[in-house]
Amino acid sequence: MTSTWSRKLIASAAAALATIVVGYLGVMFVTFVGYQFAGTIFAQASPYFFESTIITFFLVLILGVLGLFRFRLLALLGGAALAIIGALLGLIVQVATTGQAIDGTVLASIFATLVSLNLVFVVVIALSAAFIGYPVYRLVIRTQASVLAEDRRVALVRMPASNLAEGIVTHLDRTPIDSELADQQWDGYVAAFDAAGWETKEVAWAEQLADSVFIEDAVIVFGDLAVVTRPGAESRRPETVAAETTARELGLQIRRIEGEGTLEGGDVLQVGDTVFVGRSGRTNAEGVRQLRGILAPLGLDVVAVPVTKALHLKSTVTALPDGTVLVHPDLVDDASFFGRHLVVPEREGVAVVALSDDTVLISAAAPQTAALLEDRGYTVVQVDISEFEKLEGCVTCLSVRIR
């Protein structure tokens, strides 16, 4: 499995190379124009900028791995700073190779180039980092994530606790839970993944953690990165320990939501390069901020969404494999916020799990929605999860897909 750091290194190398190549060509072009299109200037300018260009490449590469390309503005400002350092070091190297002593007078003349010839170098490299390196970095990161997704299909699941009936209920009235039926329904849910060609991996059973069956809230996976959450309900925080252990066993890189941040996986919905995060009663602003910082290097944009009518965001919206977001008018205030969307007839129909590009898993409580999706060319697998729905669960809550 490709580690997060190696992915960053590959993306940073591509971004640094693109930045330097375009930047160098840009510098040569500006110099050519500045010297009134004199062809002889290339022979003079190329050696002048060579060392500076090489040094700046390695600086951009190193800082890229450390986060230079997280944001376009950061790439612009960081690119300018690195170009200044690269230009100065490049000239120092040139002077040193001639055997000339580097004294105060020489250093002063080197620094003076920053307001003359090397000013062009700094400006062009900075612009190249922001408008060439930044998009290249994001493209390479996304491409690597897509390749990883094609290599594995693992679903993490967790057997219902003995005290499942004591699970937290927030937006629904508590109703009796048939634990034996819940176990049967969980078996049917897992069997649906097996039948669709997924490998199911059980997280260690937590007999007395009532809500632990809702494994989605404990860990969120993006490619080969697992974000261990910090549930908003304190009683649920012990659930993350075994989830993290399993993620490590699968070779995933680990990041955590820490400190005062709270975040539950049911509030996180990825649609393409956008990650919608519900600002619910379980996920706070600090949790959103931390997740934004974790995902920015992967080229993913985090967008906070208010959630007031259900426990989690994915109890109100999910997305089909083609990116169409499913909504129900009783659960969202403004469906246009999500862009391309489809209104479904049942509240339970907003939650789907993509088993493949053309197959989705949906609750048996949403037969009209199932028919609607079939009419749009999807194969729909229906599972009965009524006992979990009594605890505000849905089909997404019971698994974590690694793909």
Image: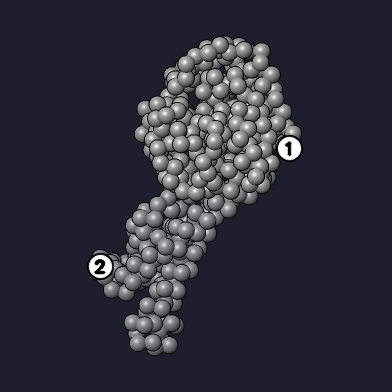
Give the number of marks. Answer: 2
Label number found at residue 23:
none
The residue at 69%/22% (across/down) is 187
Q: Quadrant of residue 81?
A: bottom left
Say what amino acid the circle numbered 1 marks: Gly
Q: Secondary structure at mark 2?
A: helix
Q: Which circle, 2 or 1, is nearer the viewer? A: 1
Tag 1 or tag 2, which sits nearer the N-term? 2
What crowding class fits label 1: few (fewer than 14 Cα within 10 Å), some (14-19), or many (20 or more)? Answer: few
On the image, the x and y values in percent for residue 332 come to 43, 36
Residue 155 at least partly seen? no
Image height of 27 relative to 329, above or below: below
Percent coordinates x, y for residue 125 in the rendering = 39, 65
- Residue carrying label 2: 108
Q: Does 281 sit left or right of 147 as displayed?
A: left
Q: Is residue 151 visible?
A: yes
Position of the C terminus by quadrant: top right
Q: Would you name the residue on which mark 1 appears?
A: 197
| Residue 288 coordinates in the image, percent (x, y) | 40, 36
Q: Is residue 109 above or below residue 71?
A: below
Q: CA distance from mark 2 to mark 1?
A: 68 Å
